[in-house]
Image (cartoon, rainbow, N blue to C red):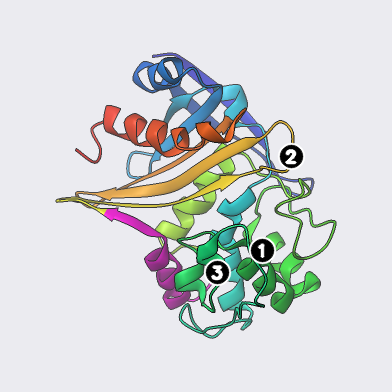
Amino acid sequence: MLRFLLILLCCVAAPTFAIELIAAPKISAQFSQAKVNGTFVMLDATAQRWIGHNAERAATRFSPASTFKIPNSLIGLATGAVSSVDEVFYHHDGQPKYLKSWEHDMGLRGALPISNVAAYQELARRIGLQPMQQQLDQLNYGNHRIAGGVDQFWLNGSLTISAVEQVQFLTRLAQGALPYPANMQAAVREITLLETGKNWKLYGKTGWTGRQQPSIGWFVGWVEQDGKLYTFALNMDIPDAADLPKRIEIAKASLRSQGLMQ
């Protein structure tokens, strides 16, 4: 396996840090077979071993799009913008939405799985610009940058984050190691759960920068299997909306190629 040393600049005020990413041919094969340009990185948190595909892109920042709903949920709880993941804070205004499933009143438990953009924009407005900035700084999330409105920055390209940084953030969340109360982190983990197998659980969130060019798709999350943690992030070019299912397909195939979720 080829080894790449990634030097990543977290932000202006943060120190430079390095990780060693081991190229995984079985993962690269998933991208080749799907004819997709993208990256996939995975951290075995127990062994502290990074593997993946396309090291240069893994260190490149892109808009998080709807993957930001994970930290947004946590920030909403931490700032008191919502009291729990079950508080119904979003009230449908009666106007047609991008998806019919968004046209209902709901809380975080209902809004995150269906990626309700309007609900999370309302949550961000409740949080407020200054508290949001403080929380992003505390989380050391991506480039920390908020511009264009408190309900737009994760959609308009202002806030950016790399696949490696996504994995580092999600590893801390999965381990309950973020600077927030344990019950809040547990609540966000709970609503992020996607699938359960015999000896594994898959947590995750998709994202799509549909308004931006080039259009980027995300699938980030983690797998808990046999008492161990494996955190991952995929991003890829989305030239056509028909390619969106490939985000999850390639990520799952990559995870399975490493003996997970069998």
Marks 3 and 2 in Cβ contact (< 8 Å): no
Which image quarter is the C terminus in?
top left
Image vertical order of residue 99 relative to residue 36, above or below: below
Identify residue type, mark 2.
Gln
**SS for dot 3:** helix
Marks 1 and 3 in Cβ contact (< 8 Å): no
**SS for dot 2:** loop
Q: Give the residues drawn in magenta, as a range.
A: 179-195
Tell whether position 114 is magenta: no
| Residue bearing the label numbered 2 | 212
**SS for dot 1:** helix
The percent coordinates of residue 50 (x first, y second) are 43, 32
- Whichever of labels 3 and 2 marks the residue nearer the N terminus, that label is 3
Q: Tell me the CA gap for discs 3 and 2.
A: 26 Å
Q: Is residue 191 left or right of residue 152?
A: left
Residue visible at 71% across and 60% down in the picture: 137
Q: Nearer the viewer, residue 89 or 99?
A: 99
Disc 2 crowd rating (10 Å Cα; few below 14, some 14-19, many 20+) is few
Tell whether position 185 is magenta: yes
Image vertical order of residue 239 relative to residue 155, above or below: above
Q: Nearer the viewer, residue 121 or 96?
A: 96
Identify residue type, mark 3.
Leu
| Residue bearing the label numbered 1 | 138
Image vertical order of residue 9 relative to residue 194, above or below: above
Residue visible at 78% across and 53% down in the picture: 145
| Residue bearing the label numbered 3 | 74
Q: Tell me the CA gap for discs 1 and 3.
A: 12 Å
Q: Residue furthest left?
A: 198
The percent coordinates of residue 257 (x first, y second) are 28, 27
